[in-house]
Image (tube, grey):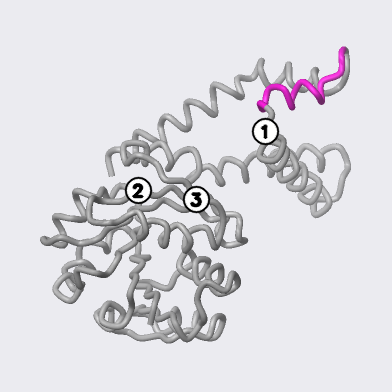
Amino acid sequence: MKLGFIGTGNMAGAIMGGVIKSGLFKPEEIIGADLLEAGREKVKTLYGIHVTADNKEVVEKAETIILSVKPQFYESVIAEIKDVVKPEQIVITIAPGKTLEWLAKQFGKDVKLVRTMPNTPAMVGEGMTAACRNEFVTDEELEGAKKILSAFGKVEVVSEHLMDVVVSVSGSSPAYVFMFIEAMADAAVADGMPRAQAYQFAAQAVLGSAKMVLETGKHPGELKDMVCSPGGTTIEAVRVLEEKGLRSAVIEAMKACTDIAKKM
């Protein structure tokens, strides 16, 4: 088999769905391990992959392994599988705070490692993933890892020292955006709009705005200015947001997030 997962939770499922939908891998080329039978059966039913309760079986059968367990389980899982990991295999990690140096120490031998930080929009095919590699991963192997990661969204290679920043700007940021959408919808409800409709309007506005940034290549400030007519409604709303400290609140929240990531 070509691709193996240790852990079959939501992020693993998002990756499985992405690579199968893209045609990169067939279901029969994927194996996933999970201690919980419910987790195994869920991905088997959804994606038709092979499943097992044995982490070592995944390593023994797959060419590329994705460690998709929670960060607190990395040490014990690596201790379990390190002796069966082969020199030619690539191990992709998705845990915040687990550096390439830390991972190498856990394995205790030369292992091809690709450290990544995806985010939850991967579950709808719109993920943003950062990736970095250790010295044993070739350019060709990195491109292969990027193909896997791009099957559920966008991927960028970054220097490892930026990984903690990635946590705040894309890993955790969906939570900030959800709060913004919820606040926008609450305001619309307060002004008489039905809640379901308010969520639809707010979410679509955020989606469309983000797409404008990505597809036009224009600076966000320029796009903002395009909406703000002199003496109009939008500039008045912008004035209040500035008065209430929106930018400062976002910046301070992200700096706090990055600080926590550095301590993990």
SS category of the residue bearing label 1:
loop
Q: How many marks?
A: 3
Q: Which mark is residue 217?
A: 1
Label 3, label 1: how far apart the Cα atoms are = 18 Å
SS category of the residue bearing label 2:
strand
Residue 118 screen position, x and y as percent: 46, 53
- Residue 225: within the magenta? yes
Range of residues picked out in magenta: 219-230
Quadrant where the image shows the N terminus: bottom left
Task: Please identify the dominant SS of the magenta region.
Answer: helix
Q: Residue at x 81, y 43 (%)?
A: 189
Pick the front one: 218 or 246: 218
- Residue 155: within the magenta? no
Residue with the most extreme left position: 108
Q: Amino acid at mark 1?
A: Gly
Judged left or right of residue 248, residue 135 is: left
Residue 85 in which image quadrant: bottom left
Judged left or right of residue 7, residue 150 is: right
Q: Amino acid at mark 3?
A: Val
Q: Earlier in the sequence, mark 2 or mark 3?
A: 2
Query: Within 10 angstroms of label 2, few (less than 14), some, or many (20 or more) residues?
Result: many
Label 2, label 1: how far apart the Cα atoms are = 25 Å
Residue 124 screen position, x and y as percent: 62, 61
Residue labelled with disc 2: 132
Query: Within 10 angstroms of label 3, few (less than 14), some, or many (20 or more) residues?
Result: many
Judged left or right of residue 235, residue 118 is: left
Residue labelled with disc 3: 155
Residue 18 screen position, x and y as percent: 56, 67
Quadrant where the image shows the C terminus: top left
